[in-house]
Each structure stands twice: as C-alpha cells, then as structure tokens.
Amino acid sequence: MNNPQYRQRAIQLREELSDDYFLLWIWDEALGAAGKAGQFYDVRALASLKDAQNAGKIPKLFKPISIYDNQGGRIGFMIKKVGEGTAALSKLRAGDLLELIGPAGNGFPIFQGKRILLVSGGIGYPPLWYLQKELINHNQVYWMHGGARQGDVFPCDEIWTEDGSIGRHGRVCGGMRENIAKYDVNLIYSCGPMPMLASAAEISQELGIEHYVSLESYMACGIGVCHGCAVPIGSKDDWDYHRVCKEGPVFKAEEVRWELL
C-alpha cells in the first residue's frame, strides 16, 4: 500500500497495561497485509457510538501511533495517555469506532544474519515489539528498554528505570557499550525520546556500528502536507529538512543532524 488509506474500524479488544498505557486492537486483513514494522497510523477516536454525534468532543487532529503488533489482520496499537488526543483514545472500548489513516512512513529495513541491539525508551517500545518479531528468527537480538519508573517498562531482555524501581538503575543508554561488547553487536535499532536517541547515536557513531533510529516528532497533519515534523537530515556539509511522517520516521542515525535539533 503506497498511499495511506482512510478507514473507520471498530475496536475489537482493549487491554490495560498500566495506569498510563493500554492496547487497542482492530481487525483489517488488507491493512494487515500492507503494514510493516516501524510504520504508523494517524488515529483519532470517534468516541463511543453514543457520543460520536457530539462532534465537539472529537479531537480535531489525528495522533500518530506506531504499529505495536500485526498478526495478519489483527493490528494492535500501544498508547500512553499524555494529552487530549490520547485521553480521547483512552476512553474507547470494544465496539467503539476508531478513525485511521495509514499505514504511513517508511518502516525499518530488515536484515538477516546480524547481531542486533534494540534500544527503546518509554513509548518508543511499541515499534520495536513488532520489529523484534520480524528479526528474531534470522538474527541474534538483544533488547534494552528504559523508562522513568516501573509503569513505563515492559517485557524485554534488559530493563532500566531512572528511579531504580525495577531492573537496572539509570538511563538505558548507560548499558549500551557494555552490551555492544558482550554480544559483539553489528547493528542497532532505536526508538524513544530525542535525547535518548541522540545519546544512542553518539555511541554507535563512536564505535562505527550501523544504526537506524525511529524519530518522534509532533505531526499536525501526519501525511506530509504541513511540514511541521521536518528534521535536518544529511551530512554536516550537505543537509536538508525531511518530513518524519513521509520520508521517515526511520532514518540512519549518522544522517540525523542531532546538533540542530
């Protein structure tokens, strides 16, 4: 599917993960066949069937949400409640309607025979969950995930929390060099807050390891029209702005001009 498609789909299932995180599942075989790890959908709650008639309660803007899982036509979105749009999504239950535009973005490149390190932070977890399922049978994969506290972390190989409530105490990039050496890593994928990605990119460039980042950026339109999500991409002497929603969200870490962000 080269162009994102508009759909309205009923929520099939809602799962609670923690106080702030939840999962929404829909069913669409055509979208399932089109989606790739690292892509996203622009989604918006149509509220409940009862409330959908009250247009004033429906957020005007769509929210970009990464594909957490894709099992044929069973597509999952892992969402954190952080603002008006995600608060509206948090009220959805099975049977309620979801508006979707997608799948959008370029997705992660998939390799075989690599020794891979996955690094995620906070809500950077969902796209790597889908990615590791695509990689695990043909590569050696080790996954590190970090968050502020216990409620921000989920199953992986190594957990880090800033408050030390579970796993290792500190920020997730603090363990990168150790694991790169231990597992002889030759490929890195990462997703999370921009400061975390910049730190991870600095380490990978220092060690000369191929690294792909999925960037988080505010998207007003999510379809490449407004250019509100543009980031500087290229070499230090030859760069231009690229849209996270259209040319991204996945870029080579070495091509992101971190010093300009």
Image (cartoon, helix red, strand yellow):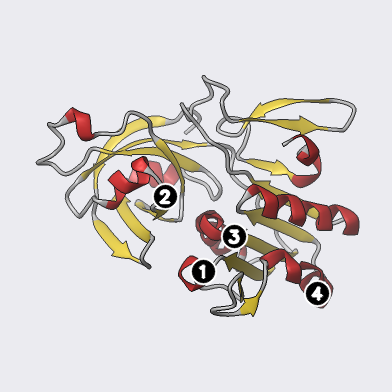
SS for callout 2: loop
The mark tally for this picture is 4
Q: Amino acid at mark 4?
A: Glu
Q: CA distance from mark 3 to mark 1?
A: 8 Å
Residue 219 in view (yes/no): yes
Residue at the disc numbered 4: 178
Q: Amino acid at mark 3?
A: Gly
Q: Which image quadrant is residue 85 in? A: top left
Determine crowd level at label 4: few under 14, some 14-19, many 20+ residues with C-alpha closer than 10 A: few
Q: Is residue 137 left or right of residue 27?
A: right
Mark 2 or mark 3: which is in front?
A: 2
Residue 153 is marked as 1
Q: CA distance from mark 2 to mark 3?
A: 15 Å
| Sequence-first tag of 3 and 4 | 3
Q: CA distance from mark 3 to mark 4?
A: 18 Å
Residue at the disc numbered 2: 82
Residue placed most toward the observer, 110 or 204: 204
| Sequence-first tag of 1 and 2 | 2
Residue in the picture at 32% in, 47% down: 87
Residue at the disc numbered 3: 121
Query: x, y (%) of residue 166?
Result: 55, 79
Q: CA distance from mark 1 to mark 2?
A: 16 Å
